[in-house]
Amino acid sequence: VRLNGETIQMYKERILKLLRTSRGGYVSGEQLAAKMGISRTMVWKHIKSLEGEGFGIEAVPSRGYRITSVPDVLRIEDIRSGLKTKLIGRELLLLSATESTNTLAMEMAAKGAPEGVVIAETQTGGKGRLGRKWISPRGNLYLSVILRPALPTHKAPLITLMGAVAAARAIRTTCRVPASIKWPNDILLSGRKAGGLLTEMSAEPERIKHVVLGIGLDVNMEMSELPADVRGLTTTLAVEAGARVDRTELVRQLLLELERWYGVFLSKENDVLREWGALNVTIGNRVAVSGLGDALQGLAQGIDSEGRLIVRQDDGTVRTVASGDVTILKK
Ligand code: BTN
């Protein structure tokens, strides 16, 4: 019998499921073989292949096989199996490595790809805001969503705020830590950065053609994988939660929140702004803003309907900023 790759994958998934649902008990090769109608030698081959993927599998003569450890690797079947979304993540591409999920998603969208999601385990040329690099070791999450909203271009910055809301909520639910947002779109925990968002757009003069919403979350990496100069400003979800985070669960929850908040954004965008307001730590504080234009300081009063930051300077003048880096000043 010749099996194609898809069939082999299917058998492997079934073996994995049988082992996992046995709750740590042994399942004999004979049982597995009988349940699937394949030989014990084939079962053994699939077990070896699962070991090759990083699963720890113990084989004890006359008892059978037992899973002892699960690799911290994302698997598309695992993400899909518990996914509760209708749309977001149904088109899903998962890569071991790519230059940048945003770059790839932009290329795919330009060629007509439908709304969908690209995830990579690591990025060789991850992009941050303001032309910076986003260092992307394995163990974290690097995800980009292709969206095609029928909206004017000036609405695009709100998509980043929407994404930040979804990310903060997904982190709160999955890791039980109080994630917050610093304008425009940093994800903070204990005052340190644990993630960021980068939105890219292709547009006609008036109308969005497509948007790629990129989300990078520092999840399970070792802090030593970051250069020393950014280490002090950064934290990871695992550090804050005090335990390794189940990235599969985090992805599912993130896709669910993205679907929810994208829907809210399309129907009632003020509700996104309100939720952003509830999660953010910028408004109401004295801030220093630096970046493209001149630096300024003052009280962060709020954001406007396009997501720009409104700052009241000490001389009373009010300025509106569309991008930049914010430092929250001590009161
Ligand atoms: C920032 O805070 O500077 C934004 C960081 C955005 C990083 C994510 S990781 C997934 C996606 N692909 C990229 O190259 N960048 C975004």
Image (cartoon, rainbow, N blue to C red):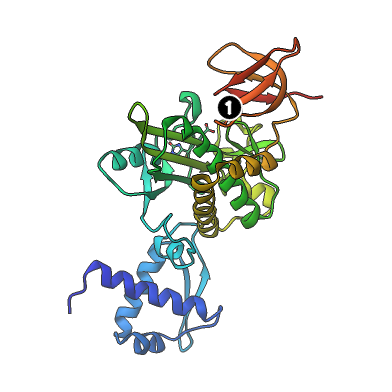
Residue 32 as seen in the image, left or right of residue 243: left
* Residue 193 in the image: above or below residue 308: below
Please state the horizontal and vertical placement of residue 10, each as a whole percent of the image: 33, 73
The answer to whether the beta carbon of the residue marked 1 is less than 8 Å from any atom of ligand 1 is: no
Please state the horizontal and vertical placement of residue 280, each as a whole percent of the image: 67, 38
Q: Quadrant of residue 205?
A: top left
Question: Residue at the spot x=39%, y=85% of the render?
Answer: 32
Q: Quadrant of residue 325?
A: top right
Quadrant in which the N terminus appears: bottom left
Packing grade of label 1 (10 A; few <14, some 14-19, many >=20) is some
Q: Which residue is mark 1?
A: 308
Residue 317 as seen in the image, left or right of residue 127: right
Please state the horizontal and vertical placement of residue 275, each as a whole percent of the image: 64, 44
Q: Tag 1's secondary structure?
A: loop
Quadrant in which the C terminus appears: top right
Question: Residue at the spot x=30%, y=79% of the render?
Answer: 42
* Residue 82 in the image: above or below residue 171: below
